[in-house]
Amino acid sequence: MPRHVVLLLSGPNLNLLGTREPEIYGTETLLDHVQAARGAATERDWDLEHRQSNHEGDLVEAVHSGIGRVEAIVVNPGALTHYGWSLHDALAAFDGPIVELHLSEPREREPWRHLSVVEPLATARVAGEGGAGYPKAVALAIGAAADSGGSGSSSDPGRPS
Ligand code: DQA
């Protein structure tokens, strides 16, 4: 049996976590968050793949590489959350649960952060919980994939049409 895989995507500037605006994003590094996320996947006997990029096209290609191969996606798109329409379109082509994840709560910050292009595609959203959000988002993604038969099929009832 092939292993179940959840893909974690990290957008621009998240590679700087630990030193980037620690009063907003905390002092844990991206590696710390990926390890916590992977722990939540491993506990459920899933694999977790991670990709961080500062370039929208890389993240688009990472989504493409997941289509038909991974069963769920957790995405913290960084600032692409608010304007990354090609990332939106790539995620719209992915046939499985998508969990939107943020360390901070963008809705409580500057008005330009209030729009999320990912939100209409997301089966769940985790925001404002800091690093604790990473394992939580992975658990939600895996739970949603399992509920939809673990195949990431379009029969997923949580997926907006
Ligand atoms: C973020 C929130 C975004 O508005 C911001 O551009 C980020 C990080 C978060 O995790 O809180 O880079 O996605």
Image: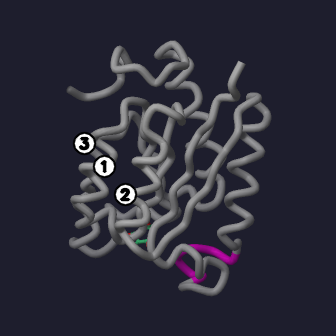
Mark 1 vs mark 3: give the one in front. 1
Answer whether residue 127 is visible to the viewer in this image.
Answer: no
> For mark 3, what is the residue?
120
> For mark 1, what is the residue?
90
Pointers 1 and 3 in contact (C-beta within 8 Å): no
- For the record, the magenta segment spans 22-27
> For mark 2, what is the residue?
60
| SS label for mark 3 | helix
Where residue 122 appears, x then y in whole percent? 35, 40
Q: Is residue 28 magenta?
A: no
Q: Residue at x 58, y 76 (%)?
A: 15
Q: Nearer the viewer, residue 29 or 3?
A: 3
Q: Residue 113 occupies which quadrant of the picture? A: bottom left
Is ligand 1 within 8 Å of the beta carbon of the residue shown at mark 2? no
Where residue 27 appears, x then y in whole percent? 68, 77
Q: CA distance from mark 2 to mark 1?
A: 6 Å
